[in-house]
Image (spheres, helix red, strand yellow):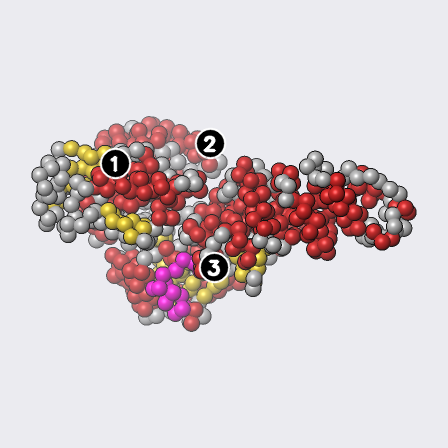
């Protein structure tokens, strides 16, 4: 469906290509659609720049965010010039679109670039607006309006969105929009089944289930359509195929909703539009519960008390607060299960990270708990269903469980605050889950209010005992005390990290592993790296760069050394450290910043490819040495970059720093001296001086009585002339 909206401004000039009737098309290959023709954007990266701007219409997109969106972590050295080139080319294309004010459609400022195209002229925003209209109609039980809005939304979808557009931002948006489209297809199919149009549904879904084999709801709808059309045997075959696909891909059994349809068909029930359409039993797509769920006894008891209170007619609010991986969602899902077991009406809410919009699904009503599978959906956006939520609470004890509230727009949070105001006078419990960062101003007000009322539940790490229980349950064998202690140190006891680590049999590698090399560098741990980096992707580009550099420098980094390594202005570095501290990634202790959790440091270090890491270690070592930074830090970097030891500056630096190294890190000094002495470029004078320094470090550590074997072996390995210990003058010690 093509919608052309005329701007107030008239056509500019005489160029027939310039028009005030246009659409920005991001579904398919990005392009500008004019009456009778399409205007191409250009090559792939230019389309990626355009898409990144078009997905945030009317907003200034900073240059570093634009670079991250298009090039990700592999940005070329001269990426700024590439951005300017693409922006200049886009201006020539976009000159065909006059703005109402007569100003350029694409503007630039010191802050970044802005595409001043109204959102209603961009097809993906038309698509999401129509989906919102459909959801509103659904909440009002306006089936005709919902069907019409869904049909118009699906008519926009002619191809994959952002087709052929490279970059991480496009990939993320493609996945998000595709998920919205698939959900709309499924809902539209339900409405048509209610009208008895099963043949249309079979024709449409038979192909889609092959493309999306893990979407259980799509398999369920296809089974219902076949069943409604009198093809029960074909419907049972669809179930068997779906079961095999799900088992092969995920290693699990089909969910309750799909299995229930299978059992009804197998039992010989007769289908009808009522049992197949929107009034039929449907499964809300809650995240999977953590298996096993360990610990959090005090927190679960506190939530249990609140659930008991709402059952007695007393409402309230709780905040489950914690950083990434601390298990907020897992605890909220346990809350849902406990509330359902108590017979309360349960609403599950989750905020989408990219759209910052909140969906609300009716999980279970007390009246339906025994009569159905206990799950229906349908309330959707909070700002459009406040009255329905309050009406539910007026009828029976109701619990709203809202996850990822830190992403919610201020408008959504204001609606949530209105619900909190009403909770005091109703049997309504609101349980929120949120990270400490990021948070908007409205959410901060809500958090302060809940905290003042004593409703804040802060999630810390698991204890070693709880980690032992988790690991033993996951691996089917008990972890040794040493393994538990090491796993706890590496993961900080954070449940999400511990689960990912143990899932790849991480404890088999525990014991004796230095956290500087770390577990996430081992094969099979890429999922843990991706989990951690995705959780902190909200941080600004300067902060991410700071953390990646600090991770290469080590677990604890002096602020001065970090400033030298980044060549950053003090103000920029301070802002980055403050942001990372607020997000819980690091602790800034005076002049030293430390990663709170070793695996987080290793995940940030792994953002730099292994092939590049050695070169960066060498460059950082040289830069820090020239600036006179701590010898121990420079020495560790040199050992991480073996090629650096052949640089001609190393022997002189090492001899100048050996006294400091010998006092603070004698083993490091010994290793550096032993390796550097072997290098062919070292002069005889440098060799002699390094050999003498090595002797001074090795001998006092064992006294004169029994030092013959190891120092001689060390010196011999270093290529020096070995003298019996008894012949070494005392003064050289």
- Nearest the camera: 303 or 87? 87
Q: Position of residue 686 (x, y in %)?
A: 73, 43
Q: Is residue 55 left or right of residue 216?
A: left
Q: Is residue 585 left or right of residue 309?
A: right
Tag in front: 3 or 2: 3
Q: Would you name the residue on which mark 3 appears? A: 570
Label 2: which secondary element? helix
Give the residue at x 34% y 70%: 424
Q: CA distance from mark 2 to mark 1?
A: 41 Å
Question: Residue 30's quadrant in the figure?
Answer: top left
Q: Would you name the residue on which mark 1 appears? A: 41
- Nearest the camera: 162 or 408? 162
Q: Would you name the residue on which mark 2 appears? A: 248
Label 3 vs 2, first from the N-terminus: 2
Is residue 119 among the parts visible in the rendering? no
Question: Residue 509's quadrant in the figure?
Answer: top right
The chief SS type of the magenta part is helix
Q: Position of residue 63 (x, y in %)?
A: 35, 48
Label 1: which secondary element? loop
Q: CA distance from mark 1 to mark 3?
A: 40 Å
In the displayed structure, would residue 283 be above or below residue 444? above
Label 1 vs 3, first from the N-terminus: 1
Give the residue at x 10% y 41%: 13
């Amino acid at each position: 469906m093509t919608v052309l909206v005329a701007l107030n401004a008239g056509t500019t000039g005489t160029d027939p290509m310039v028009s005030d009737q246009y659409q920005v098309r991001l579904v398919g290959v990005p392009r500008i659609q004019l009456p009778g023709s399409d205007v191409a954007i250009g090559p792939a990266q230019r389309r990626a720049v355009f898409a990144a701007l078009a997905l945030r219409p009317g907003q200034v997109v900073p240059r570093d965010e634009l670079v991250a969106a298009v090039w990700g972590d592999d940005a070329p050295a001269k990426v700024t010039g590439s951005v300017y080139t693409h922006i200049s080319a886009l201006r020539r294309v976009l000159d065909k679109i006059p703005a109402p004010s007569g100003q350029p459609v694409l503007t630039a400022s010191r802050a970044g670039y802005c595409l001043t195209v109204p959102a209603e002229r961009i097809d993906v925003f038309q698509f999401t607006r129509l989906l919102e209209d459909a959801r509103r109609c659904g909440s009002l039980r306006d089936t005709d309006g919902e069907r019409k809005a869904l049909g118009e939304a699906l008519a926009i979808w002619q191809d994959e969105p952002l087709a052929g557009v490279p970059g991480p931002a496009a990939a993320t948006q493609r996945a998000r929009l595709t998920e919205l489209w698939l959900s709309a297809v499924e809902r539209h199919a339900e409405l048509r089944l209610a009208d008895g149009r099963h043949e249309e549904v079979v024709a449409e879904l038979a192909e889609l289930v092959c493309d999306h084999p893990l979407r259980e709801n799509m398999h369920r709808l296809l089974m219902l359509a076949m069943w409604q059309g009198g093809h029960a045997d074909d419907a049972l075959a669809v179930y068997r195929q779906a079961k095999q696909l799900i088992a092969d891909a995920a290693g699990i059994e089909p969910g309750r909703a799909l299995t229930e349809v299978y059992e009804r068909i197998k039992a010989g029930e007769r289908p009808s539009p009522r049992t197949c359409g929107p009034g039929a039993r449907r499964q809300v797509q809650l995240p999977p519960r953590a298996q096993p769920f360990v610990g959090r006894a005090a927190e679960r008891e506190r939530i249990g008390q609140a659930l008991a209170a709402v059952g007695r007619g007393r409402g309230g609010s709780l905040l489950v607060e914690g950083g990434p991986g601390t298990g907020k969602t897992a605890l909220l899902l346990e809350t849902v299960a406990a509330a359902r077991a108590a017979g309360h009406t349960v609403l599950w809410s989750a905020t989408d990270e990219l759209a910052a919009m909140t969906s609300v699904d009716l999980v279970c009503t007390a009246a339906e708990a025994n009569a159905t599978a206990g799950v229906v959906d349908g309330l959707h956006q909070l700002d459009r269903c406040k009255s329905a939520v309050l009406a539910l609470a007026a009828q029976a004890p109701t619990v709203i469980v809202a996850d990822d509230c830190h992403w919610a727009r201020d408008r959504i949070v204001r609606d949530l605050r209105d619900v909190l105001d009403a909770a005091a006078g109703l049997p309504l419990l609101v349980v929120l889950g949120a990270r400490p960062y990021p948070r908007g101003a409205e959410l901060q007000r809500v958090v302060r209010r809940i905290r003042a009322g004593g409703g804040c539940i802060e999630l810390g790490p698991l204890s070693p005992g709880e980690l032992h229980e988790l690991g033993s349950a996951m691996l089917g064998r008990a972890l040794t005390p040493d393994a538990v202690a090491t796993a706890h140190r590496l993961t900080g006891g954070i449940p999400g990290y511990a689960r990912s680590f143990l899932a790849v049999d991480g404890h088999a590698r525990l014991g004796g592993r230095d956290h500087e090399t770390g577990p996430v560098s081992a094969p099979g741990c890429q999922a843990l790296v991706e989990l951690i980096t995705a959780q902190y992707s909200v941080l600004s580009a300067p902060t991410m760069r700071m953390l990646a550099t600090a991770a290469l420098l080590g677990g604890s980094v002096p602020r001065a050394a970090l400033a030298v390594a980044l060549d950053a202005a003090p103000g920029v570095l301070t802002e980055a450290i403050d942001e990372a501290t607020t997000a819980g990634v690091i602790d800034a202790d005076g002049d030293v910043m430390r990663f709170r959790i070793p695996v987080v440091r290793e995940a940030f270090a792994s953002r730099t490819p292994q092939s590049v890491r050695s070169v960066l270690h060498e460059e950082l070592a040289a830069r820090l040495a020239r600036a006179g930074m701590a010898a121990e830090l420079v020495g560790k970097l040199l050992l991480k970059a073996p090629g650096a030891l052949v640089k001609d500056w190393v022997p002189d630096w090492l001899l100048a720093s050996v006294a400091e190294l010998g006092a603070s890190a004698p083993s490091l000094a010994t290793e550096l001296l032993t390796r550097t002495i072997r290098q062919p470029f070292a002069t005889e004078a440098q060799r002699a001086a390094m050999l003498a320094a090595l002797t001074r470090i090795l001998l006092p550590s064992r006294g004169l009585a029994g030092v013959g074997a190891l120092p001689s072996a060390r010196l011999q390995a270093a290529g020096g002339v070995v003298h019996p210990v008894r012949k070494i003058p005392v003064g050289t010690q």
